[in-house]
Image (tube, grey):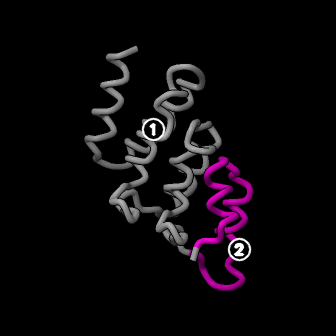
Amino acid sequence: MLPERIGEAAKSGDIETIRAYFEDDSDGERDVDDVCDLRWTPLMWCAWGDNGDRLTLGNVEVAHYLLSRGASIDIKDGSGHTALLIACYSTPTTRRTRGAQKWTAAVAFLARQGDNGVVWNVLSFWRATE
């Protein structure tokens, strides 16, 4: 079971805590796709961002690290959402008012990791409405 502090670290873009946790194999190798009680992986928490209203370059850095360790973009939570879909819907209001470039960079990075047409459809819609 994924410790709550690791979900929080992923959500806030705390790369040092994430790195320390996954590189400490003193009690066995840690699974980068481990889930919490909500069935969210660290990548999903990272895609949600800080309270679901903003993604930062720290989130991009954490996502890159998790993906480099083999995190899956295909795992679905209890509602059928992947990390890519969570990233798309995490910041619709904030995206237009602050942090637009950071948000776009985070979603685009995650989208490049797999083939998820939903991501591109959402990004295209928001570009058309700006």
Q: Residue at x 40, y 63 (%)?
A: 77
Q: How many marks?
A: 2
Q: Residue at x 58, y 36 (%)?
A: 54
Identify the element where label 2 is drawn. Answer: loop
Residue 100 sits above or below residue 49 on the image: above
Of residues 81 and 71, the one drawn nearer to the viewer in this rendering: 81
Identify the element where label 1 is drawn. Answer: helix
Give the x, y percent position of residue 8.
Answer: 66, 57
Q: Residue at x 65, y 66 (%)?
A: 4
The secondary structure that dominates the magenta segment is: helix
Q: CA distance from mark 2 to mark 1?
A: 28 Å
Region of the chain picked out in magenta, as a range: 2-30
Residue 11 sits above or below residue 93 on the image: below
Q: Nearer the viewer, mark 2 or mark 1?
A: 1
* Category of crowding for the residue at label 1, using alpha-carbon neighbours closer than 10 angstroms: few (below 14), some (14–19), many (at least 20): many
Disc 1 marks a residue whose amino acid type is: Val
Marker disc for residue 24: 2
Disc 2 marks a residue whose amino acid type is: Asp
Marker disc for residue 107: 1
Q: Say whether residue 13 is magenta.
A: yes
Find the residue positioned furthest to the top.
Answer: 130
Which of the 4 image quarters holds residue 16?
bottom right
Of residues 61 and 116, the one drawn nearer to the viewer in this rendering: 116
Of mark 2 and mark 1, the one earlier in the sequence is 2
Find the residue positioned furthest to the bottom.
Answer: 27
Q: Say whether residue 59 is magenta.
A: no
Which of the 4 image quarters holds residue 45?
bottom right
